[in-house]
Amino acid sequence: MFRHLLHRAGRVPETDTPAGGAFVPDAKFPHADIRPHLDVQHLSLSIGDQPILKDVNVQIPNNRITCIIGPSGCGKSTLLKTFNRLIDSVEGVHIEGSMTLGELDIIRSTGAGLIELRRRIGLVPQRPCPLPMSIYDNVAYGCRIHGIRGRRKLDAVVGHYLSEVGLWEEVKERLYAPATSLSIGQQQRLCLARSLAVEPEFILADEATSALDPISSKTVEDLFVKLKERYSIIMVTHTLRQALRIADYVVFIYMGQVIEAGDAAQVFHDPQHELTRNYLSGVFS
């Protein structure tokens, strides 16, 4: 997966990094543009004796923004965290059914397969969670775990993905400052850059703008719209207005079941199920 990345990174000019760490990002970093879709069949999930997800069947399209909507407590975030198995950290979880990403069996992945899964499906959390290290090292962290070494290679990766999320010009003179010195909105974009740096195929966003001010929220929304050209994005959102603005595909969940899924225009303007119509009209929330 990293062969093309290493190849390009190796083309960075053979010069030392300038004093202060101000290197120039590679603006033409390549990215694979053929992606398998995420397929969920008969997925049921319980925690202890409590069923949370019930016979979920859905196919998440490639290179689209998929918004998962539904009332509080309906299972949206649980479904999202099942896609990359972060739900495993919850005690007493039991999963049945099938989830695949191309040839990768998500439910049965273990060991190295699970590490690869979490590389291919990245997560942007609800609240920014920069690592307790510099801005530079936050972006380089995952690359080092996956075997990318050498300052010039890491410089190319860090510069590119900070540019990708619109942070380069804002931080290029302070790359070695603590990540916590950034504003909340900048921290969230840094978390996104950190996820992108290991070349995921899907980006999960769990209410990723809910902790941000309106300007930062719009910046992140605009980024997702731009990034869907090369990545597939799945968002949990509690804000229907946000889903209306940016969703290409919508999954409506109610009490752990997928009630309706389809093209955003169709779901929002011509919902087929009465529960969907009631939710969209504000009968319940």
Image (tube, rainbow, N blue to C red):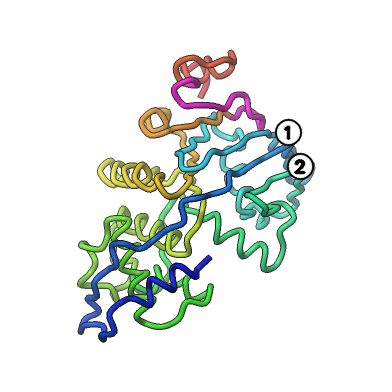
- How packed mark 2 is, by other alpha carbons closer than 10 Å (few <14, some 14-19, many 20 or more), is some
As drawn, the label of residue 55 is 1
Which image quadrant for residue 9?
A: bottom left
Residue at 38% in and 48% down: 227
Label 2 and label 1: CA atoms lie apart by 8 Å
In terms of image quadrants, where is residue 251?
Answer: top right
Query: Do tag 2 and tag 1 residues touch (Cβ < 8 Å)?
Result: yes
Q: Position of residue 264 (x, y in %)?
A: 46, 26
At label 1, which amino acid type do we have? Asp
Residue drawn at 63 percent across, 34 percent down: 58
Could you tell me residue 112's position as x and y percent?
67, 68
Q: Which residues are magenta?
A: 253-267
Q: Does the segment drawn in magenta span residue 260?
A: yes
Q: Give the residue drawn at x 72%, y 39%.
A: 43
Q: For the residue marked with disc 2, what is the amino acid?
A: Gly
**Circle 2 residue:** 97
Circle nearer the N terminus (2, 1): 1
Q: SS at mark 2?
A: strand
Q: Which label sits on residue 235?
A: none
